[in-house]
Image (cartoon, rainbow, N blue to C red):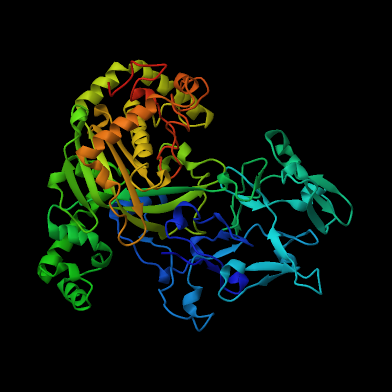
Amino acid sequence: MSTRPTYNVIRKSQVGELRPSQALTTFGVGSIVDLPNLSVMVMGLDDWPVASSMEIGEERLLFSVQRALGGQVKRLLAPPRAPETTGFQSNWFDDAQQIGIPVAPFPRWMVCSQCRLLAPLSSGLFEPKVVPYRPDKTCYVHGCRTQARPPTVVPARFMVACSNGHLDDFPWLDYVHRGGSACNGPLELYEVGASGEAADVEVKCRACGASRRMAEAFGRETEANMPACRARHPHLRTASPGGCEVEHVRAMLQGASNSWFPITLSVLSVPQAADKLGQLVDENWPILEAVENEQNVTLLRRAGTLTDFGRYSDGQVWEAVNRKRGGVADANAGASDLKTPEWRVFANPRAVQEGRDFRLRAVDPPSNYTQFFERIVLVERLREVRALIGFTRIESARDFDTPFEVPTEKRAPLSRREPIWVPACETRGEGIFFHFAEGPVQTWVSRNARHNNAFFAAHQFWRNMKNLLPDAGYPGLRYVLLHSFAHAVIRQLAVECGYTTASIAERIYSQDPVDGTPMAGVLIYTAASDSEGTLGGLCALGHPNRLGRHLEQALERVALCASDPLCAEHQPTPDGTLHGAACHACAFLPETSCERGNKYLDRSVLVGTVEKADLAFFE
């Protein structure tokens, strides 16, 4: 499934396609999408066509979003998408073709590929060109040639940003003239070398002859060459009312990985009701929430909306809706704790009601690992719902313990006003849950207090560098064990399950007894955005006769690393990195797989390495 981004700037034309999940995790509000001949920015929620969006029901996630953004948020909406059509499209300008995510060209300064003219789109020197039924050919052209085809213009690949979430066009006129000047160009941008590096790119003023290399805009020592931040939010067409406290902006290349980091919240849709009827009410709550009496239930049934309630009368459904409303306050009270309800379900799988999007099957651990695991749970069906609550620039949101910890001034807003809805997406899939035995975990943690102190010292040093409270947010050595185990297993299962490493994700359930209910579990799962989800290849590897072999191979692979002995000797304290014996060759995973940005990892806590043999949990 895909959404179709559109915007009024180029005759309301479709300029590309995105998957629904990409509209949150890769190309969300405020991000830049690189197209073949164009670069566009996804606009704020004020411009999204809400009438074409479908509401996604997930109460626990909605309550968490309200805690982060305010109680005015009432709905989770999927990205807008046009209805499915078949056959030949007779009308290119049909209204259905104009539905999608709104975007606008950015950067707004463009360069002619022929004459190298550098000018903004507002100058009127460039014209849009749209090819019917070929959105990939949408572009701007320059009329510098009158005989042949006009050349295509491309975005100037430089912009400026600050750590408070602001983004702006590169200040070309001020930069080339080294400050204030009455000269307004015109400008040209050309490359004096073949490397494409900033040192080989030069901007020149045709009017006064001033020129300057782009290398002078990059680097800590050259920040004084850049102007103060203007507090611009191009996705909202506004600037922050109070200005920006950042003294100088930072030059950035188009497509830089640190130009946009999403701040998201995600939950797994686990059953909360004790009976089948209550579970059906939970699954259909976006429809039943507006029901005011039993007659409304009758009308919904006649309209064909309540097909899942065939075995229940209208009165029973109405009573279940009232019971659901009575429990909303209790659910809202635990909005900040997203994982404990999921842990209760996975820790007691036989007491869970199966649903349309959730099915568990408990199996015995492999025979060689019965002392380490309480049970293995095959998650044959699961549903994950994710919501976007903001984004950051330059500094990743993963640098903070939770999304709620991101400072307000660094979290860029999604809309000009306080949002009443946020974009969300749902994916369905499968997984394997490892329920660790609590006794061995507690014994191992108490035995390795010195290693825990080393990680805690690194945690304090790292948070001090980020100007955060040094003692807050430390997950503990228990988390290091579970996190390292998850990475080792993901790297091993990706070899046989048919999914790439980037398609498999982790969800760590870790809590010490002193903080509440002890938790020690790891969920390895994969999910897709289509209606059926995945095909069972990952879940099938959780059977005892297969899982034992994979666990042995996973632990054997992390015992040695291609970077040993340097990797095995690495400590979490000296350089402020939040990992021990771990690197890209043995433990690190893609960003889409790890929930902590490859921090709090150490393979020596799993098995003995060439440097340490006394920390191993799996002796």
The N terminus: image quadrant: bottom left
Residue 422 visible in the snapshot: yes
| Residue at x 70% of width, y 40% of height | 218
On the image, the x and y values in percent for residue 89 come to 49, 80
Residue 129 in the figure: left or right of residue 336: right
Rendered position, 560 above or below 427: above
On the image, the x and y values in percent for residue 606 come to 33, 25
| Residue at x 25% of width, y 46% of height | 540
On the image, the x and y values in percent for residue 36 come to 61, 61
| Residue at x 20% of width, y 25% of height | 439
Residue 72 visible in the snapshot: no
On the image, the x and y values in percent for residue 246 come to 63, 41
| Residue at x 77% of width, y 44% of height | 200
In the rendered image, the residue lying farthest to the right is: 208
Q: Nearer the viewer, residue 113 or 103?
A: 113
Please tell me in which quadrant of the rendered image residue 602 appears: top left
The C terminus: image quadrant: top left
Residue 292 in the figure: left or right of residue 224: left
Rendered position, 303 above or below 427: below
Please tell me in which quadrant of the rendered image residue 258 appears: top right
Rendered position, 235 above or below 372: below
